[in-house]
Image: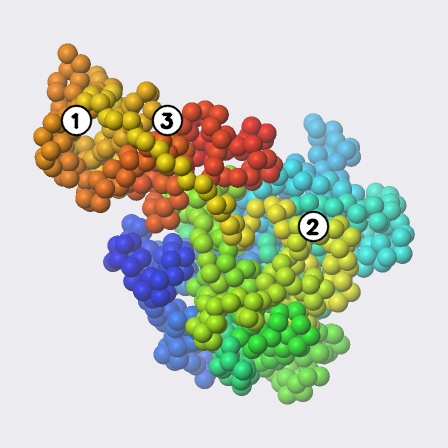
Amino acid sequence: MHSKEEILKQTLEYFDGDEIASDVFVNKYSLINDKGEYLESSPDDMHKRLAREFSRIESNYPNSMSEEEIYELFRDFKYVVPQGSPMSGIGNPHQIQSLSNCFVLESPKDSYGGILKTDQELVQIAKRRGGVGFDMSTIRPKGLKTANAARTTDGIEVFMDRYSNSCREVAQNGRRGALMLTISVHHPQIRDFIKIKRNLKRITGANLSIRLSDEFLHAVENNDDVELRFPVDSSEPKISEMVSANSIWNEIIESAHACAEPGLLFWDNVKKLSPADIYEDEGFATVSTNPCGEIVLSPYDSCRLLLINLFSFVERPFEPTACIDFDKLSSIAQKAQRLMDDLIDLEIEQINKIIEKIDNDPESSEVKQIEKDLWLNIETQASLGRRTGLGLTAVGDVIAALGLTYGSDESIEMVESIYKCLALNAYRSSCQLAKERGAFPIHSHEKEKDHPFLKRIWESAPDILESSRKYGRRNIALTTTAPAGSVSTLTRTTSGIEPAFLLRYTRRRKVSEGDNIDYVDSVGDCWQEYEVFHPGFKTWMETTGEVDPEKSPYHNSCSNDIDWVKKVEVQAAAQKWVCHAISNTTNVPEDTTVETIKDIYMSGWKSGCKGVTVYRDKCRSGVLVKHKNRNKTKFVQHSAPQRPTDLICDIHHANIKGEGWTMLVGLMTNKPYEIIGGLSKFIEIPRKYKDGILTKHPRKTMNSKYDLKFGENGNEVVLKDIVSLFDNPNHSAFTRTISLGLRHGAPIQYVVEQLQKDKDADLFSFSKVVARVLKNYIKDGTKANGVKICPGCSSENLFYQEGCITCPSCGWGKCG
């Protein structure tokens, strides 16, 4: 077992001083037992755990990889990286969770019972660390007659709120909630779905995407009407209304321009090009997508994610002769697909543990039935399809390392070559696995023979076609590109297919319980902030000896620099060889017009993408934020008023890392003049006294420097050796420095805001406790300095109220 301090030290060394990488590993992936004790001291321990478990599965099959060989794939995050749930859950006996990152549920049945069933399934998955998506097109529009007491239907909005709230509820105390709600563009309440998140306080627990049909998009092109209908897929709908397609289209685009939602799914592209949809009759018809949009799934199917760190295949990065070792990439891709198939076996083991726990839970069988049926359905789909989610990360860094500009024609050709290599070798490996282990149970080459995506694979590699005919394929669908998220922090590369966000930026990480808080967003979620230089850019500087960003291959290649047309072309080039979808955000500048957003979406549809998300700069708060240059400040000399012998003081009590502390704030003209403090065991204060007098001791020695006196009926209490009051002598210097600033006129809110920026401090650290004490002296109505713009409504009119930064316009607040 290891202390958190020990692990932080070791992981900081492991990551060469990268604090955010160290923090992400310790808080998200290091193995912890039931008592909260750390069992792994570094990522190397985690990689050995993963290798051990994968090796155990491999030993059940012919031509198995050894534990050492698997470890070498994982070691240092160099070649193969399981994402999220697999990394935290594999070989973890202390937590019963799914290893799947993504799930899609059956669309809610159009009744209260059906809607509540979906609600329960959502929370049951979320509590096992899974992200969920489902389609709401099955719910009747509002205002129709019903046979119950309500008399009319509620429609989709109230249930969107329900599902969003459930997701946020289950995300508390370390659990991660992630939800995607989709709807057909033909649903009669499509306008309500489009507009609902324009209110930034609604549906804060879900992402929204619209399933756009070719029927609708062709109507937009031709300026025709389109049918809104229910049921949406019926040729004889009970409800039908013809409306202008462009009126709907304009509302979609305006909302996407304003708040980056809803995202758009090009549904006919999804259905035509997803191999699993061949098996619609067997229950594998795609109905929705996971929260980030990269995995399109059928009801109760799930997917595990694993990625390849592409940067490790670049020889001589950032040098004139840089190139990709495609032979090595081909070999590792085949091994990675093999590990993906092993991961399905590991997941089925986990599902069986979940089912066993449900059986042993004390509740009645009636209470447990929905949860048990849910996991039985998931197990069935996992066993029948053996779906995998093999992807890449570091694409942006690789383009730069090759000396190319992200979005150039040469880079687009390179992206297609990379993804083609991944696809061919993943499919080649899956056919070899079918030979050794058997095809997925419902495989039929006869059904697959005319599928456009599979034909593209087979035409490029006839050996895969021959193997498929003879042995079948082990996995119903194989590849994707997910956002690498925190995993890209561990690999220290660009995320997924994305370019570098910026060369210098502020990164936000959602806090876990007990973490310090730097930023609270518009919906009340708490984040830590890190100032980051992009690692690839630092590598370029070290390799070339250059320091000028304009001379680097990243110049004009960051997220907001790239022409949107080229960004869509990059995505489309990859999508040709990806059988699921791709999570990719087209970033555009703040002044981008609505018409440009329209063009981006149309280009995505026509180029064969399965979905597109556009983010216009500053339209909402995000995880990555541009670094803001601070304005130069004119410094003014202030004289400090001389300290009188006696000062009235306020007495504050606090708990710092399990020990009681007493903080004394000396007041002059009712304002803080000085602050001292120490362990409460050195200071005994009668409970009936709240205020005292700080008396400067005349002797100029380190002992008995201050007395704390009370009124004539009180006992005199003398503070002992001022140094011994602090568990660290540096704390004495710390408070003396703060006192110096206070008596020289530093505004209290500035002092508090600086203390709250301590990245290494948790909520119970000395600096945060001092900040909480001092914020009591910030007058209500004081202009806030640390937060410039309200995340809720973009107002710049922020003030302190009872020590908290508050927006009077929308009610948003942040307390340190």
Mark 1: amino acid: Lys
Q: CA distance from mark 2 to mark 1?
A: 60 Å
Quarter of the figure with the N terminus: bottom left
- The residue drawn where x is 90% and y is 52% is 224
Disc 3 residue type (three-letter): Tyr
Numbered disc 1: secondary structure: strand
Q: Is residue 390 visible?
A: no
Q: Which residue is mark 1?
A: 696
Mark 2, mark 1: which one is toward the viewer?
1
Of residues 241 and 802, which is closer to you in this image? 802
Q: Which mark is residue 603?
A: none
Report the number of discs: 3
User: Considering only vertical position in the picture, is 78 above or below 130?
Assistant: below
Q: Are marks 2 and 1 in contact (CB under 8 Å)?
A: no
The residue identified by callout 2 is 591
Question: N-terminal of the two: label 2 or label 3?
Answer: 2
